[in-house]
Amino acid sequence: MAKDIRPDGTVAFLPHRLNRHPVVVRGLTANELWVCAGSSGAIGLASGIPLAFMFATIAIVPTAILLAVAAGIFIGGGTLRRLKRGRPETWLYRQLQWWIAVNLPQLAPFTDGHTLVIRSGYWSTRRSKAL
C-alpha cells in the first residue's frame, strides 16, 4: 500500500483527474479561494479602519471587509480563471515561485525558488562542434 503513494502525497494508481484539486468557486480551487479571500479581507480591514475613524462608527470595518472579500472573490476569481486557462495545473504556483525568486531573492529559500532554473540568454538546441 505504501508503495502506491508518491512523495508528493498523491496516489499512483488513481486516474489523473482524481489527484487534481476540485474547483470550488469561480474557477478557484480551495487553496486559491483562501488566499484570494484572505488577501482581499486584509485590504478591506486596512481600508475600513480609517473609514471608521473618519465617520466615527465601528460598523464600517466589518462592512468594508465583507465588501472587499466579495469583490476580491468575484474579480480575483475571474482574473485567475483567465490567467490559468490552457495552462498546466501547477502554472500559477510556479509563476509565483519564479516571481519571488526573481524579485525577492531573500524569500526564495522559503518557496524553494532557489531550485528553479532562472537563466536569461539564448538556449541552443543544436549540437555544437567538438572542440
Image (cartoon, rainbow, N blue to C red):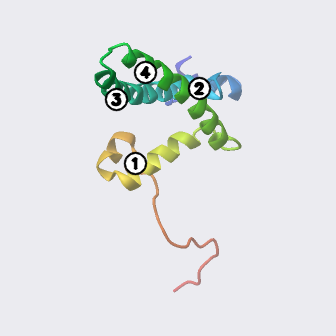
The label number, if any, that marks residue 46 in the structure image: 3
Which mark sits nearer the N-terminus, 1 or 4? 4
Could you tell me if residue 64 is visible in this image? yes
Near mark 3 (Cα within 10 A), the count class, few <14, some 14-19 or many ≥20, is some
**Residue that appears at 71% across and 43% down:** 86
Residue picked out by circle 2: 29
Where 81 falls versus 123 (above or below)?
above
Which mark sits nearer the N-terminus, 3 or 1? 3
Which mark sits nearer the N-terminus, 1 or 2? 2
**Residue that appears at 37% across and 24% down:** 48
Near mark 2 (Cα within 10 A), the count class, few <14, some 14-19 or many ≥20, is some
Give the residue type that dot 4 points to. Ile
Give the residue type that dot 2 points to. Thr
Residue picked out by circle 1: 100
Find the distance from the CA under tag 3 to the CA under tag 2.
26 Å
Which mark sits nearer the N-terminus, 2 or 4? 2
User: The residue tagged with tag 3: helix, strand or loop?
Assistant: helix
Q: Quarter of the image holding residue 15?
A: top right
